[in-house]
Amino acid sequence: MLETVTMAAAGAATPEVSPILQQLSIFVLAIFVGYYVVWSVTPALHTPLMSVTNAISSVIVVGAIIAVGGEGMSTATWLGLVAIALASVNIFGGFAVTQRMLAMYRKKEKK
């Protein structure tokens, strides 16, 4: 009897959750949190946050390069190539948007 109580307290009676379902749930929650965080940012903080997202994207590129470096053409290699392409577009687009926003704060030259 004591063994049954110990097993139940240790969580042995809980059902197994699929790892894919768990990861998908976290992904969906991250989408909602990201959406609400991005849309609540004031315009004054947009440029510094763009710089941070560029830094995060550069870390993604490094991880994708490591994934592509494996032997053969596995799924990880193809996903790594896609990650490199998408993160590169994000980095260059982020720099373009940052430069454009910084140009809005420059004083215009008088002719």
Image (cartoon, rainbow, N blue to C red):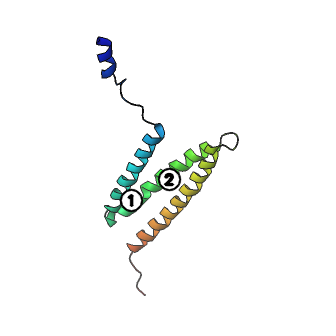
Spatial distance from mark 1 to mark 2, Cα to Cα? 14 Å
Residue plotted at (70% across, 41% down): 72
Query: Relative to residue 70, is residue 93 depicted above or below?
Result: below
Q: In the rendered view, tell whether residue 108 sits above or below residue 37.
A: below
Q: Residue at x 33, y 58 (%)?
A: 36
- The foreground one among 58 and 34 is 34
Position above or below: 71 against 80: above
Image quadrant assignment for residue 41:
bottom left
In x, y percent, where is residue 90?
A: 51, 59
Give the residue type at disc 2. Ser
Residue denoted by label 2: 57
Q: Position of residue 19 (x, y in %)?
A: 47, 37
**Label 1 neighbourhood size at 10 Å, few (<14), some (14-19), many (20+)?**
few
Q: Where is residue 81 in the image (x, y as percent from the top left)?
A: 62, 51
Q: Nearer the viewer, residue 12 or 41?
A: 12
At x 40%, y 85%, the residue is 110
x and y percentages locating residue 61 in the rendered image = 55, 50
Element under disc 2: helix
Task: Give the quarter of the figure containing the C terminus.
Answer: bottom left
Q: Residue at x 43, y 40 (%)?
A: 22
Between 85 and 8, the one lying in front of the other is 8
Q: Which residue lies furthest to the bottom in this view?
A: 111
Question: To which residue does mark 1 refer?
Answer: 48
Answer with mark 1 or mark 2, whichever residue precedes in sequence.
1
Instruction: Give the amino acid type for the residue marked by disc 1 in the picture.
Output: Pro
Badge 1 marks a residue whose secondary structure is helix
